[in-house]
Structures are given as C-alpha cells and as structure tokens.
Amino acid sequence: MTLRIKFLLFVTIIHVVLIALAAQVRTVNPVLFVAAEALLLLSLWLTAQLYRGFVRPLELIAAGTAAIQAKDFSMKFVPVGQREMDHLIDVYNHMMEALRNERVSRHEKSFLLERLIQASPAGILILDFEGQIAGVNAAAERFLGQRAPELLGQLPAALPGPWGAALGALAENQPQSLRLSGLQTYRAHVAHFLDRGFTRRFIVLEELTTELIQQEKEAYGKLIRMMSHEINNSIGAINSILHSFHHYAPQLAPTDQPDFTQALDVSIARNTQLANFIANFAQLVRLPPPEPRPTEMHALLRGICRLLQPQSEERRIRWHLTLPSAPLVVSLDAQQLEQALLNVAKNALEAIGHDGNVWVRTAADPPTVVIENDGPGLTPEVSRRLFTPFFSTKRDGQGIGLTLVRDVLLAHGFRFELVTSPRGTTAFTVWLVPAA
C-alpha cells in the first residue's frame, strides 16, 4: 500500500467519523450542528491543501527518481512557491547539473582517450578481467598481423606465431624487447588500471625497428669506414711492391723463377680478395638513396632468372615463373631493387643446394613479388636473426646479403618478410607499395 493511499484512507475515516458525529447532534443542538458543519468544511479545505502540498513533492521525487534511473540528467524542476519544496527542488537541480557536467566531462575524456589510443603509433591491447583481449588499436592490429575481430576474446599467450610465447611471458612493470623474424624489434610492457574498483591490465607494444637499424648502421658504418681506409691503403702499397718484385724474377735461377712468380701471384690474389671483401662492406655503408623511376617488374624478374640460369642448370634447379601477361609497372630504383632480388634469388639457390625448384610470381593488387623455394626451411633460431648484420648460416658467408636487401627495401618504404610455410617451402615476399 502506497503512502498516498494510506493518507487518503486516513482522512476518509476521520471525515466519516466527523460526519457521523455531526448527524447525531443535528436534532439535539442545531447550533452545534452548524458549527460542526463549518468545522467539517474547514477540515475538507485544509485536507485538500495538505494533500496538494503532500502529493506534489512525492510526484516530483518520483519524476526525479525516474530521470536518474533513466540517466537523464537534463530534467530540472521549477519552484512551486513552497519554501520546503523549493529548497528540495533547488538541491535536486544543483545535483542534476553536477551529474550532467560530470557525465559530459567523462564522455569527452573517454572520447579523447579512445581517439588517442587509436591514433597512437604504439600498439595497445586492453585486457578484460579474465585477461582476454577486450580492446585493440590500429597499431596493434598492424604489429600482430590480425584484425580486431580475430584478436578480441583471445588470451595474449594464445596468439599465433612468436607473439603468443612473447606476450604470455610478460611480467608487469618489467619491459622486454622482442625481436621477430630477424627484422622487427618491439618493446612490450604490461601495466594496469582500475575499472569499477577492480584491476585490469593492458599491454603496450612499441616498435623499435627503425631506431635500432639506424643505430646499427651508424655503429658498423664507422667501423667499416675505418677498416676500409686502413686496409685499402695497406693493400695498395703491398700490391704495388709485389708487382715490382716481378722485375727481379729474371735475375733468379731458372729453377726458382716459377716458385717466386707463383708466390707473388698468390699474394697479390689474396690481397685483391681481401680488398674486394672490404669493398662489399663499404658498399653496404655507402648505399645511396633510391632514385625511383617507373620500372616493369616482369622484365626485371626475367632478367634475374636468365642471369642465374647457368648455375641453376648445373645444380638441376628448375625455375617456375608465374607472371601475368599484363605489365606490372612500379616506381622504384631498378638498379637497387634488382641487386636486392638477385641476392634473394641466390640465397634461394644456396638454400636448395641441388635438385629443387624456385617459384617466382607477382600480384597487381597490391603490387607484390614472391620468390619461393623448396629447400630446407628456416629454424626459429635462424628466423630471429635474419637480416642481422654479419649473421650468416654459410661457412664462408659475410652476412651482408640480407642486410643489403633489408636496407634497400626499407629505403624504398616496402614491407617484406621471409618465412617458411607449413608445407615446408620458404618464401620471400615484397609488397611494392610504401608501408603505411
């Protein structure tokens, strides 16, 4: 039973009693009856006034409560001319104004935070109370190579590839560096925030690839320039002296002349090889900026295939070119990219050894080149160190081939990857469009 019904029931009972008492004195004392009737009318008028003053606050309180439940903080009341009621209305209006301002402020801050997260160059993964991914920004999608719908609801440790193991081992407030595929390097750290009084965590991924590559180039560039200067100066002087010794060969006994000449030639040849060895490193340091021009990629790839055909035939390695009839024209530095793809193709031949296949294919949307081979796949340890300067799996390798490829493609702004597929083939893929 509501308070209003109780009030109406109470005043009804009181007035019924008053009417019954007035009826009893109507014949006995007319004067008292008239006075009772006047008192009854006054009571009815006062009851009506009291009801209006009593019910009106209840109606306002009910309307205000409904507005709060509906989270409608724009409803306000006007004063009704009653001091107590006007004070209540004033308090309510101030409260609603404060709630509305707080709501608008929180909405604006939340909107700003969402925009900052989406625009951030750092990847951000927001986890729910169970540790599953509940939010992800565009940078994190790009780093992880998956779209948001595929990531939402997953545990970080369950992500495919090296990301799962790396993110699953993260500890809060202990940033870690992650090197993936020998090229991309990231710093990841975990922190937490409070949501409705409970702790939630988030993961921040920062890409360090460009900065680290620049630092690497500056470090080994200084070393190579110093070594190249000193070694080339020494080799030039030594070879000049060795060539001069050839003039003394006729002065020796005929039986000693062949050994003397052979020793000089071997020394000169070894010095020349050392000079070429240093020149290869110097070329890596002195790589000029690319000069892009429209280039037909199919003609460039056919030229690389023809160049490597003799040694491919010796090793019984077959080339399979899947090139559409329509030309694929891309703006790039043809000389630099040809050298980079030539290094990739040579690595494919060396990976196969003998009796294998190399597939070359392209796509137009987006412009893409893939060089794939069926040689032994890459181990996880090797994959993490690919494109690292001076790292090589070959016994006599210098470790600059893939480094040169990396620098050429990064200078063009092209994205690329070298991975072993589940079926066992290893593919080098280059997207011939500047990375976003």
Image (cartoon, helix red, strand yellow):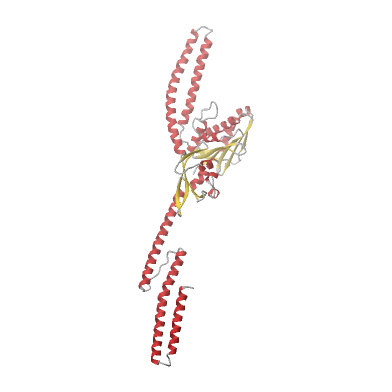
Q: Is residue 100 above or below residue 220?
A: below
Residue farthest toward the top in the current orientation of the protein: 253
Q: Residue at x 39, y 80 (%)?
A: 46
Tell me if residue 369 can be seen.
Answer: yes
Closer to us: 421 or 89: 89
The one of 278 and 248 positioned closer to us in this rendering: 278
Q: Quadrant of residue 301?
A: top right
Does 144 appear above or below 213?
below
| Residue 142 position in % (x across, y down) | 51, 45
Can residue 292 be seen in the rendering of this structure? Answer: no
Q: Residue at x 49, y 24 (%)?
A: 276
Q: Position of residue 433 (x, y in %)?
A: 52, 42
**Residue at 44%, 25% in the rendered image:** 227
Judged left or right of residue 72, residue 322 is right
On screen, residue 90 above or below 245: below
Residue 82 in percent (x, y) is at: 36, 74
Number of marks in the image? Answer: 0
Q: Looking at the picture, tell me which residue is in the foreground, 175 or 17.
A: 17
Q: Position of residue 251 (x, y in %)?
A: 48, 7
Q: Quadrant of residue 72?
A: bottom left
